[in-house]
Image (cartoon, helix red, strand yellow):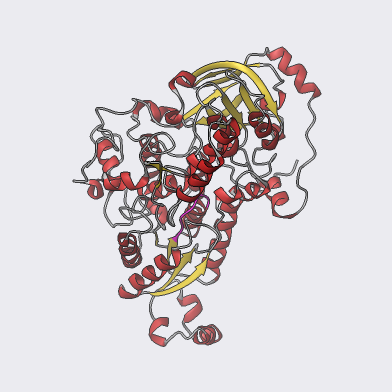
Amino acid sequence: MKSDTVRKGTQQAPHRSLFNALGMTKEEMDKPLVGIVSSYNEIVPGHMNLDKIVNAVKLGVAMAGGTPVVFPAIAVCDGIAMGHVGMKYSLVTRDLIADSTECMALAHQFDALVMVPNCDKNVPGLLMAAARVNVPTVFVSGGPMLAGHVKGQKRSLSSMFEAVGSYAAGTMTEEDVKEFECKVCPTCGSCSGMYTANSMNCLTEVLGMGLQGNGTIPAVYSERIKLAKHAGMKVMEMYEKNIRPRDIMTEKAFLNALTVDMALGCSTNSMLHLPAIAHEAGVDLNMELVNEMSKRTPNLCHLAPAGPTYMEDLNEAGGGYAVMNELSKKNLLNLDCMTVTGKTVGENIKGCVNKNPEVIRPIDNPYSQTGGIAILKGNLAPDTGVVKRSAVAPEMLVHQGPARVFDCEEDAIAAIKGGKIVAGDVVVIRYEGPKGGPGMREMLNPTSAIAGMGLGSSVALITDGRFSGASRGASIGHVSPEAAVGGPIALVEEGDIISIDINNNSLNVLVSDEELAERRKKWQPREPKVKTGYLARYASMVTSGNRGAILEIPKEK
């Protein structure tokens, strides 16, 4: 056992004395040491129930012959962090989570791990750690929130943010806003639409790192507790068979994840996280693959914010495995990939039928013949930008309009709510990228304000920042290179005509190369917004959004 390093032999007598201090018996010390990474906290609604999930995992591990030991991971609530300095601290936690989990796992020589994540950056951070540490590992999330009910309709957090925009536009009363406030988030769990948390928990299942239902069983269902017990049991099977994360998270598995991403219409944040996880697993995941995948992968689901269905509906319809089974009918998946079930993808999804063709469209009747995400390129985004195509109004798939340029999120929101943005405009928010932010803030407030003001089908938004999975509309993010390093988005001027053609994957500013070259001569790097603390260190190491905003040690010039 790997843990023999800290528990066996005379030289390890001091180590055993410390295990004794923990109250650990000889019997426990003779069994595999299984780390359970608990992301429980009392500030994130998606994490407030994880203590129950962790206890269930402990039971499962112990029942299957392991010694469970819990240690923590942090998590930020993106909703609470939204729209202020707190959002600078969201994406950056992904790497903190990966680093701290690596430290704990290797410092204590765990034989196996069970990861218990739920919300946004917590999931990819722990997947990155799993790939680095590479001991048998199983994931079990806390599960999605049930949808709220307002005025007879299912609602979620995205409708709450849009309600604020509607109030600013005068189309909603303060009493209406309060009703939304009290009803849109009725339970614990990750927010009820196909936002980032639920996207990543579903893709964890697709990658083969989570059991069936990991992405869709609601947080409040007893079935979630059973799933956690099974995860604890299953990690011991993975240990006995020596099946490790890098055996599972192969190139083929990531291609499966991209394919299902297209079918589900996942958050654009998946385009940051999948390449970062792949990087840790030793797989080079080129984002330009996405368009190739999208061309052949139909979009089968329109979950909120793209449509009126929610995670609970997807679960009842058969969940991720039913979606995968639909895709397999056109040979769109690698069915021979190994998973933490101990079976292949093909074996897992066999017989998983689609129980609701309104929630999961049959493969021969999709919402669209192309996938939910598109990668754009052009003189405004030479390295790429990302858009959630499935959440764009049809009339905005091709659009030209004047640039309305803002150097931070706050100025853009003030202009939108102040009625200064009109139909046809293209809002450009820059210096919000991984380095420039620093931290690559989510632009949910601006996109929600645009939607709430009734401009969702006539105004586009382009940024080197990113978007919440709750954002909808012609919202193009991750524009690379970012403004802070002199990307073309830094050279855009008020009134420049921006050309968006999502159908043809292009994003351009209609300015000559000569004029852009002249502007570049005058451009000067901005003084960093943050010069101390973790954000400053992050800014010095982070790469561009098109590479997943991974951290690299700066090369000597």
Quadrant where the N terminus is found in the figure = bottom left
In the picture, residue 142 is in which quadrant? bottom left
Q: Is residue 120 magenta?
A: yes
Frontmost residue, 131 versus 460: 460
Q: Residue at x 63, y 14 (%)?
A: 510
Is residue 157 shown left or right of residue 211?
right
Q: Residue at x 80, y 30 (%)?
A: 524
> Relative to 473, is 54 above or below?
below
Where residue 532 sits in the image (x, y, percent)? 77, 53
> Relative to 10, is 73 above or below?
above
> Relative to 414, is 225 above or below?
below
Is residue 158 shown left or right of residue 219?
right
Q: Residue at x 56, y 86 (%)?
A: 14
Say if residue 284 shows up in the picture: no
> Relative to 517, is 282 above or below?
below
Where residue 492 sits in the image (x, y, percent)? 69, 22
Frontmost residue, 138 versus 31: 138
Q: Which SS does the magenta portion mostly show?
A: loop
Q: Is residue 326 magenta?
A: no
Q: Residue at x 39, y 30 (%)?
A: 371
Looking at the image, how many numbered discs can be counted on the residues?
A: 0
Say if residue 322 shows up in the picture: yes
Q: Which residues are magenta?
A: 116-121
Frontmost residue, 435 versus 195: 195
In the picture, residue 137 is in which quadrant? bottom left
Quadrant where the C terminus is found in the figure = top right
Is residue 109 shown left or right of residue 331?
right
